[in-house]
């Protein structure tokens, strides 16, 4: 029997610029149409425009254009227009859960409200795109921790994913997970296994995009982080915390729809490599735009799927387009005496749960004691939480692969044969609310070591699209072939998004 689920990560996010746009201060999550259980959302904290995180003692309320709560025993009253992000916690008294943590929901009108005297009209939910949600059993309850194979929107884009599960705890000689479909999409899981990674105390173990493991012994935050316009992002990007920088999909003063971010780190002498630690995710708005691009294909979307599923050249073209447009991959440049040099690629993740990854960087010769790194991100598509570098050599680790020992789907299917290896067998989740209870054996921790547990998954998903019209071939051709056209399309959608009326006082 499943236990009550709580989102202890408390990272359901609402940006200020969306509140200004909608005029809506009443915020309760509207479930996806396919989800029937009633959940409860609570405001548990805020992040202000000044970069101050305030955690509430109890649930906050929104009234008279202010958010009101107690923090550390004292009353806090903050004007809504000073709030950069709202932090919500969702709990559910039944065995399924609604939409999650780590998102900017008002960006696409998914929010209805939390607490107000008169509820406003519910905004239209235009839909978004995601992946399975994975919850770790921490010994007391399930905690939302992973959202694997994001961006793998058809079989030809199927990929492996690697997610560290910091909350997962052994319970009676086993590890327990939930995998749940919480989106209007069909999800296809090919593999689910755990890696029990034993390592020296005091170091962090993180994967790169391809599953290679790296130890982080001395991560250094940026000394300076600024955009090309001079906006100081240093405190926003220097820690894995509640300060998450996510620019709106609107043009800057020069008409540009990309932000160039330059980070400066101290650099020891004679180092030739660095590990860039990233907690950077795809934004919910970005996922919504990519879904909208798919819907432009109308009734011909299946033809596009068939092409991607049958042609490696078509797959390569999709990957190149996403990187060129800075949509689901960001090129990482390192400054050399001769100028900027491409050194690595930062992948997307999320949009609901950004994963921490390592990007290995080859460093050019240096003329001073600093390392300067540049990324150029399309506005509205990215949420930046944390960036740091580590110059230490990777330490040895011991890895045990834990195969699925028990897997039961919500339809009572046995999943062990479906999820134990990469093959042609899949666990298919076609309906919102489909879920799997997964159990893996524990192995003893090696003496004198600490353990990190990582989830290795493989799969893909297909969105449930409104594909009833003819393809908009002219717009699709522009998006595919004109640099920057996707960002322009995103900005246009942003200006046209539905808004909710402010409730009467």
Image: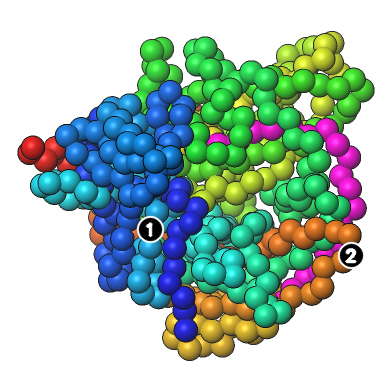
Q: Is residue 120 above or below residue 298?
A: above
Residue 364 located left or right of residue 89: right
Q: Secondary structure at mark 1?
A: strand
Q: Residue at x 58, y 82 (%)?
A: 407
Q: Residue at x 26, y 44 (%)?
A: 61
Which quarter shows the C terminus?
A: top left
Instruction: Specify few, some or many for label 1: CA neighbours under 10 Å numbering under 14, 14-19, or 20 or more.
Output: many
Residue 110 located left or right of residue 205: left
Q: Position of residue 160 (x, y in %)?
A: 65, 60
Instruction: Specify few, some or many for label 2: CA neighbours under 10 Å numbering under 14, 14-19, or 20 or more.
Output: few
Q: Which mark is residue 477?
A: none
Residue 321 appears in the picture as rendered: no
Sequence-first tag of 1 and 2: 1
Judging depth in this view, the residue of 85 and 482 nearest the camera is 85
Q: Residue at x 82, y 26 (%)?
A: 363
Q: Which span of residues is magenta-colored?
A: 385-403
Q: Secondary structure at mark 2?
A: loop
Judging depth in this view, the residue of 410 and 331 nearest the camera is 410
Residue 51 appears in the picture as rendered: yes
Residue 192 located left or right of residue 107: right
Q: Position of residue 81 (x, y in %)?
A: 28, 27
Judging depth in this view, the residue of 141 and 422 nearest the camera is 141
Q: Residue at x 56, y 58 (%)?
A: 146
Residue found farthest to the front: 73
Image quarter of residue 26: top left
Q: What's the distance in space between the residues labelled 1 and 2, CA to CA?
A: 38 Å
Residue 467 located left or right of residue 258: left
Q: Which residue is mark 2?
A: 447
Q: Which residue is mark 1?
A: 90
């Amino acid at each position: 029997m499943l236990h009550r689920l709580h989102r202890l990560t408390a990272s359901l996010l609402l940006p200020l610029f969306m509140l200004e746009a909608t005029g809506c201060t009443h915020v309760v999550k509207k479930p996806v149409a396919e989800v029937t259980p009633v959940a409860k959302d609570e405001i548990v904290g805020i992040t202000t425009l000044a970069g101050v995180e305030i955690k509430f003692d109890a649930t906050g309320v929104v009234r008279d254009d202010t958010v009101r709560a107690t923090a550390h025993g004292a009353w806090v009253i903050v004007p809504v227009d000073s709030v950069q992000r709202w932090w919500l916690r969702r709990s559910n008294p039944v065995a399924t859960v609604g939409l999650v943590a780590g998102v900017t929901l008002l960006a696409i009108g998914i929010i209805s409200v939390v607490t107000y005297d008169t509820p406003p009209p519910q905004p239209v939910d235009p839909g978004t795109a995601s992946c399975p949600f994975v919850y770790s059993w921490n010994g007391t309850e399930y905690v939302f921790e992973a959202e694997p194979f994001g961006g793998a929107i058809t079989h030809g884009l199927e990929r492996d994913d690697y997610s560290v599960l910091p909350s997962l705890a052994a319970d009676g000689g086993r590890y327990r997970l939930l995998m749940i479909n919480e989106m209007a999409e069909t999800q296809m899981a090919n593999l689910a296994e755990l890696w029990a990674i034993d390592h020296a105390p005091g170091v962090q173990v993180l994967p790169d995009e391809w599953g290679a493991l790296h130890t982080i012994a001395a991560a250094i935050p940026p000394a300076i982080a600024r955009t090309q316009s001079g906006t100081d992002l240093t405190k926003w990007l220097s820690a894995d915390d509640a300060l998450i920088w996510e620019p709106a999909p609107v043009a800057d003063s020069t008409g540009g729809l990309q932000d160039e971010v330059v980070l400066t780190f101290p650099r020891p002498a004679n180092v030739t490599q660095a590990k860039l630690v990233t907690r950077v995710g795809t934004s919910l708005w970005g996922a919504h735009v990519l879904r909208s691009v798919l819907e432009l294909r109308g009734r011909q979307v299946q033809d596009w799927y068939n092409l991607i599923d049958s042609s490696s050249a078509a797959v390569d073209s999709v990957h190149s387009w996403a990187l060129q447009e800075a949509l689901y991959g960001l090129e990482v440049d390192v400054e050399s005496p001769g100028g900027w040099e491409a050194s690595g690629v930062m992948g997307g993740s999320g949009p609901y749960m950004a994963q921490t990854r390592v990007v290995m960087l080859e460093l050019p010769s240096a003329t001073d004691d600093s390392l300067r790194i540049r990324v150029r991100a399309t506005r509205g598509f990215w949420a930046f939480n944390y960036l740091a570098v580590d110059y230490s050599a990777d330490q040895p680790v011991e890895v045990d692969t834990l195969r699925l020992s028990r897997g039961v789907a919500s339809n009572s299917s046995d999943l062990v044969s479906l999820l134990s290896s990469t093959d042609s067998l899949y666990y298919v989740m076609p309906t919102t609310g489909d879920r799997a209870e997964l159990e893996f054996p524990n192995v003893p921790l090696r003496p004198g070591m600490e353990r990190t547990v990582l989830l290795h998954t493989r799969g893909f998903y297909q969105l449930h699209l409104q594909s009833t019209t003819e393809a908009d071939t002219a717009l699709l051709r522009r998006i595919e072939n004109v640099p920057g056209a996707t960002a322009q399309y995103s900005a246009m959608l942003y200006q046209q998004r539905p808004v909710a009326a402010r409730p009467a006082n």
